[in-house]
Image (tube, rainbow, N blue to C red):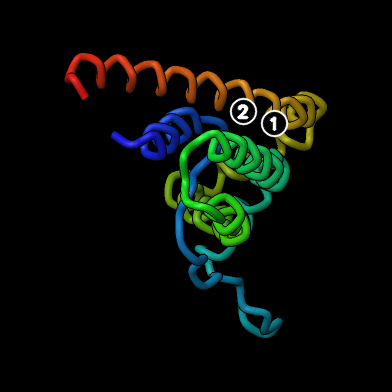
């Protein structure tokens, strides 16, 4: 297992709050809600809008940006081809990741749950939780990376590779 695979695996394993995912390659097309004010919003569009609101309120974009910075720091310590880190960071599209997450939230959470989450994040406790999430994610990311690296190293030694 390459060091790059180990770090990507560790990052994926640590991404439990609320979502951290990474993808190589260019971002795909966006799925904006239609701008035509005469067209009625569909149920799916309404649910996706509410899912996006939840992620806005819980600071998902900031968490993604911080995780990307940590990933870039980890990449700098690896033997990667010249220019890899700069190209990866320039091509990584956080908004694309948010769009992907919106679809997952909309698939997994029903509208009353999304409404409850929006209401929760509007409370003092919800705002405090959202404010703490970036630091929580940082700690989870660091712990997940360390655990994944240690586990991979142990297994590589066991298998003689």
In the rendered image, the residue lying farthest to the right is 124
Quarter of the image where the C terminus is located: top left
Q: Position of residue 38 (x, y in %)?
A: 68, 85
**Could you say which disc has been placed on residue 90 in the image?**
none
Residue drawn at x 51%, y 72% is 29
Is 146 above or below relative to 98?
above
Judging by the rendered image, the residue that carries numbered circle 2 is 137
**Could you say which disc has been placed on residue 134 in the image?**
1
Q: Are marks 1 and 2 in contact (CB under 8 Å)?
A: yes
Q: Is residue 48 visible?
A: no
Q: Position of residue 160 (x, y in %)?
A: 18, 19
Quadrant location of residue 131?
A: top right
Q: Alpha-carbon distance for marks 1 and 2?
A: 5 Å
Image-based side of 124 in relation to 57, left or right: right
In the rendered image, the residue lying farthest to the left is 159
Residue drawn at x 34%, y 17% is 151
Which of these two is toward me, 5 or 46?
5
Quarter of the image where the N terminus is located: top left
Is 103 above or below relative to 77?
below
Quadrant location of residue 24?
A: bottom left
Image-based side of 78 in relation to 66, left or right: left
Q: Position of residue 97 (x, y in %)?
A: 54, 54
Is 106 above or below relative to 128?
below
Which of these two is toward me, 123 or 64?
64
Residue drawn at x 73%, y 43% is 57
Q: Position of residue 31 (x, y in %)?
A: 54, 70
């Amino acid at each position: 297992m390459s060091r790059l695979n180990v770090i990507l695996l560790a990052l994926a394993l640590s991404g439990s709050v609320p979502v951290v995912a990474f993808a190589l390659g260019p971002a795909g097309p966006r799925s904006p809600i239609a701008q035509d004010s005469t067209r009625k919003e569909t149920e799916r569009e309404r649910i996706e809008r509410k899912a996006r609101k939840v992620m806005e309120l819980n600071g998902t974009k900031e968490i993604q940006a911080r995780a990307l910075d940590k990933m870039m720091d980890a990449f700098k310590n690896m033997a990667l081809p010249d220019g890899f880190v700069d190209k990866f960071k320039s091509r990584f599209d956080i908004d694309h990741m948010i769009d992907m997450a919106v679809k997952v939230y909309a698939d997994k959470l029903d509208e009353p749950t999304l409404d409850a989450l929006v209401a929760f994040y509007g409370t003092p406790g919800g705002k405090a939780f959202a404010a703490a999430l970036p630091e929580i994610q940082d700690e989870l990311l660091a712990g997940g990376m360390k655990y994944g690296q240690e586990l991979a190293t142990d297994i590589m030694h066991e298998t003689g590779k």
